Amino acid sequence: MKNLKLDRPLAVFDLETTGINPDKDRIVQIAIIRIEPDGRRTTFETMVNPEMPIPPEASKVHGIKDEDVRDKPTFSQIRREVEEYLQDAALAGFNSINFDTPLLMAELKRVEADLDLRGVKQLDAMRIFHTMERRDLTSAFRFYCDEELVGAHSALADTEATLAILDAQIGRYEEVPDEVEELHRFCNPHEGKFVDHRRKFIWDDNNEAVFTFGKYQGQSLPEVCKDQRGRGYLEWMLGKDFNEEVKDILRSALDGVFPKRQ
């Protein structure tokens, strides 16, 4: 490292997991590079048996399947090594503050680890990136078209810039398709997966709407509506700041009419 000055150990880490819910999902692979203030480095990396099935959508992201981790150690079996690598260290990752650290903390708590990460110092390269590099239309026009956008925030100028950026993106990346249908699928990879546009409900394997948040996360609307407590929760939601699409789903559910997947 040329620029980062350390006054304590730094543990740079990354997790591959069964999903994106820090409270529910599990680690399937962990890597940690521990850097001491004098520059010495040690590395720890292993696949982990999550003791639960790895969803196909997660395997599509990281390529790890159930058979790859079947004979690997559980997190409980590696937690001592993980604690040693993290002990007295600041943490660093990419989107680690929002995701990796909370999930790691949940895993440590689950196995009753001695290490407590509350209050640990955290560095997040993604937050630095998003803070320092603007991600607006003017910046995109400069990056893809190598020009300065004149008349930004004029509707016509912004529209012309957007068209130029879109065309430049298609020419720049082999992975980005050049036909409308395929480009639509590229821009909407989760189309058809969620019941509503705000992603408050997701379709399950039985084509029922399932909560993605809150106290009934993972439960279907018909299941929640079976008792008065669940119905009371839906009525409470109707009084909160959810959009009308979600509220229409709730009202229909309370009337016994549930969403049908097309």
Image (cartoon, grey):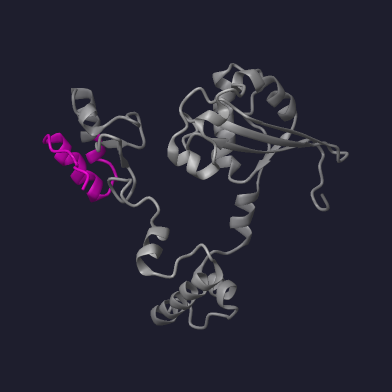
Q: Is residue 227 above or below residue 137?
A: above
Q: Position of residue 13 (x, y in %)?
A: 67, 38
In the picture, measured across the screen, residue 24 lies left or right of residue 48, that is: left
Q: Position of residue 249 (x, y in %)?
A: 20, 43
Q: Is residue 202 above or below residue 115?
A: below
Q: Residue at x 46, y 72 (%)?
A: 166
Q: Quadrant of residue 71?
A: top right
Q: Position of residue 169 (x, y in %)?
A: 51, 70
Q: Position of residue 95 (x, y in %)?
A: 58, 45
In the picture, measured across the screen, residue 104 lies left or right of residue 218, that is: right
Considering every residue shown, the one lying at the far right of the view is 38
Q: Quadrant of residue 233?
A: top left
Q: Is residue 251 magenta?
A: yes
Q: Residue at x 81, y 42 (%)?
A: 6
Q: Residue at x 64, y 28 (%)?
A: 117
Q: Residue at x 32, y 41 (%)?
A: 202
Whether residue 26 appears in this view of the structure is no
183 or 86, which is in the foreground? 183
Q: From which residue to which does the magenta span run? A: 236-262
Q: Is residue 202 magenta?
A: no
